[in-house]
Image (spheres, rainbow, N blue to C red):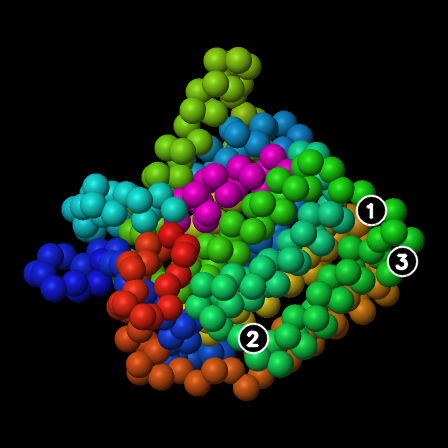
Amino acid sequence: MDGIAGGAHTPGFASRPLDPAVLRPLPGSRGAAYGALVLTAALWGSSAVVARGLLDTISPVALTALRWAVVLAALVPLVWRERAAIAHALVRDTRTLAVFALVGFAPQTLLVYVGLVGSTAINLSLLNSAIPVLIVAIAALLHHRRPRPLEVAGMAISLAGVVVIVARGRLDILASLSVNPYDLVLLAGMGVWAYYTVRLADRAPSLSFPAFMFAAGTLGLAMIAPWVVVEALARGIAAPSAGAVAGVVYLALLPTLAAMLLFAHGIHRVGPVQAGLFTHLVPVFAAVFATLLLDERLHAFHAAGFALVAGGAVLGCLRPEPATRDAALAVVAAPSVAPAPAPAGAARDSRS
C-alpha cells in the first residue's frame, strides 16, 4: 500500500526507506493482544494435529489448494464492499502483494505440508521453535532493531521448554535426531513465515486486513495452481470423505482465517518480536490437543516444558516498548515490502 508520495493518488503500497519505528507497537490494550496471540498459538497447535491426519489421505498440494479456496470463499462477504480497492491493489501493487503471498499464504503452507510428509513430529516442533529466533534476526537485518535483554532471556527459556517437550525429557532422543531433505523444506517454510511476520508490521492499512488477505491469498492460490493442475492430470481427482471435508473447513476457518486475523492484531499491538515469542506455545497446545484427540498421555516432561515455555513468554513480554503516537503513525504510513532508495548519504536497505 503506497504512502502519499507527492501526488493525489490513492494510497496503496508505498516505497520508502525502512524505518525501525514500524516495529514499535501501536497504542492499545496489550492484555487483549497477548490473549489474541495465545489463542493464535492454540489454533495453530490444533492445526498441526489435524493437518498431519489429513495428509494421510490428501496430498500436500490438494490440501493447500482446498484450504485456501475455502479461506477465500469465506472472505468474500467480509470484503465485498472493498472489491474495487482490492481490484485496484491487485493491478497496481501486484509485486508487493506477490511477495506477501509467497511468504505468508498458500506457497508457504505448501512448503510446510510437503515437509510434514517426510519429517517427524519432533523435528517439526524443533524447527517451528526457530521462528522467534529468525524473527529477531530478520528484524535486526531489516530494521536494525536490537532485541532487548528480557526478550532474549525469555526466548532462551521458552526454547528450552520446547526442547524438553519434543525430546520427552531425554537427551538420547535429541542425540538420535537426523536431518533429511524434508526438514530443510520445513525450515524454509519457517524462515519465510518469520519474514512475513516482520514485514507485516510494515503494512499500511489502506486495505483492511481481511481485504489484504483476500488479495494476497488470491495471488498465493494462483502461484500454486500449476502444481494443482499437474497433480490432477497425473493422479486424477478423488472426492474427499466427509471427515476430510470437515477437516479442511476447520483448517481454513480457524487456524488460517481466524488465526491470521488474531496474529496480525497481535503484531500491530506488541510488535513482531514479542508476537513471535508466542510461537513457542504451538507445540505446547499441539501436545494438549494430541492428548485430547489422539488419546495420548501427558507426562512430567510436558508439565516442565509447559512451565518453561509460559515463563519464557511472560519474561519476554515484561517491560515492553512504550507505544507512542509517532509509532502508530509510522505503522500506518509504512510500506509493505518494497523500499525505495534512501536519500544520498543515508543507509540503504538491500532487501526488496
Residue 292 rendering spot, x and y as whole percentages: 71, 53
Q: Secondary structure at mark 2?
A: loop
Determine crowd level at label 2: few under 14, some 14-19, many 20+ residues with C-alpha closer than 10 A.
some
Is 145 or 108 nearer to us in this picture?
145
Q: Quadrant of residue 204?
A: bottom left
Q: Main secondary structure of the magenta part?
A: helix
Relative to residue 78, is residue 346 depicted above or below? below
- Using the image as rendered, state which of residue 211 and residue 246 is in the foreground: 211
Label 3 crowd (10 A; few <14 / some 14-19 / many >=20): few
Three-letter code, disc 3: Arg
* Relative side of 229 to 14, left or right: right
Residue type at tag 1: Leu
- Residue 327's label in the rendered image is none
Give the residue pinned by disc 1: 177
**Residue shown at 38% from the left, 52% from the top:** 352
Q: CA distance from mark 3 to mark 1?
A: 12 Å
Can residue 239 be seen? Answer: yes
Q: Residue at x 66, y 42 (%)?
A: 184
Provide the secondary structure element on which disc 1 rests.
loop
Label 3's element?
A: loop
Quarter location, residue 327: bottom left
Foreground disc of the pair 2, 1 = 2
Q: What residue is shown at x 86% (from left), y 61% (from top)? A: 169
Residue for point 67% across, 77% down = 153
Q: Which residues are magenta?
A: 100-116
Counting from the top left corner in percent of width and height, residue 181 is at 69, 36
Looking at this view, name the residue that lies furthest to the front.
345
Tell me if residue 246 can be seen: no
Q: Which residue is mark 2?
A: 147
Label 3 or label 1, whichever comes before in sequence order: 3
- Disc number placed over residue 170 in the picture, else none: 3
Query: Please, is residue 238 above or below residue 243 in the view?
Result: above
